[in-house]
Image (cartoon, rainbow, N blue to C red):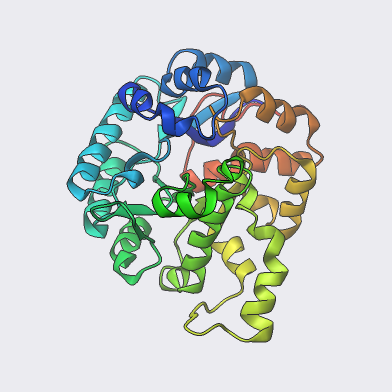
Amino acid sequence: MLGKIALEEAFNLPDIAEASKDDTAIYVTDIERYTSDVVDITGQRLQRKDQWGVGYTILSHTVPGVQGESDPASAEKMATRINNYIADKIKNHRTRYGAFATLSMHDPKQAGEELTRCVKELGFHGALLNDVQHAGSDGETLLYYDHPRYDAFWKVVCELDVPIYIHPAPPQGAIYEKQYKDRRYLIGPPLSFANNVSLHLLGMISNGVFDRFPKLQIIVGHLGEHIPFDFWRINHWFEDIEKPLGMVAKRTLKDYFQDNIWITTSGHFSNATLNFCISQVGADRILFSIDYPYETFEDACDWFDNRTEMSIGDKIAIGRENAKRLLKLKDYQDANAPVPK
């Protein structure tokens, strides 16, 4: 299928990629291949896009990124540098590439200002946050965006009418030492990534973020970070038994997924899982993605193009039309290419 849009596609700056090699090696097996691929923007990545029919890619800075920087001033400076870097890299390829902004989330007001700059001046499509913002002198303070102090940020997001992608990050500090140090194979896709984002997203739901900002649009990857498979059980607790003390959510979990939350196929190329998610949230809330360079174009695109089991209408919607609607995309390579039946 030509004209696919991919939304969870990582890049890094060469110096940051080199400096973070040891940390990345915890959950990347071929570190040399990964380090080469993650810094490439207009070389082999473009060739692979052409080969596999990916018309448009939204690039975002990889983990841990600015969310791993506990000093506010350093985090803000790093975010600005990253945003300017990727804007310059893609400026001559805007029919092939867009970007999600990188933001320091120490100060909600400053985060909103940088997002506004990136959207209005650089033409970005929203932002990607690598889970919680680490803060404090030791980096052990974790800032979650369901706290009311972040309402100032969410207000700006809604005014700009752009989505925010919440992406997982590997465990650090005390969480790593207490939970994952002796279970390192559970870091990343096997468990820790889904656990982290599920906690963050369910916190936003249960603490009323979407009720205060009903137009807010949030994207999560990996076919929903396990949450769609627990819809019944979570709602059973939230609604059928008794609302937990302090929970302020006004609607059902499924309501939020149908009105405020999008899920992508990034790194989860399973027919059974995709079809289950379609049955739970609908094909119009699912977006194609690869998770490159952690996953490959070959695995993602061959599966989606040739081995998925869904209607042609759902394939077109998930492959490109949903993303075009969400991101207000019109003109990009193969945007309206015919789809083989």
Is residue 161 visible to us here? Answer: no
**Residue 71 at x, y = what percent?**
22, 48
Instruction: Determine the residue positioned at 17% across, 46% down.
Output: 73
Looking at the picture, does residue 121 appear above or below residue 158? above
Looking at the picture, does residue 70 appear above or below residue 144? above
Image quarter where the N terminus lies is top right
Instruction: Give the quarter of the image for residue 155.
Output: bottom left
Front residue (pair 281, 92): 281
**Residue 341 at x, y = what percent?**
80, 30
Instruction: Determine the residue positioned at 55% across, 26% down.
Output: 55
Instruction: Give the quarter of the image for residue 2.
Output: top right
Looking at the picture, does residue 137 appear above or below residue 288? below
Looking at the picture, does residue 149 appear above or below residue 47? below
**Residue 132 at x, y = what percent?**
40, 54
Q: Residue furthest left?
A: 73
**Residue 293 at x, y = what percent?**
53, 27
Is residue 192 visible to us here? Answer: yes
Instruction: Give the quarter of the image for residue 152.
Output: bottom left
Front residue (pair 333, 111): 111
Left or right of residue 162, residue 115 in this image: left
Left or right of residue 311, residue 281 in this image: left
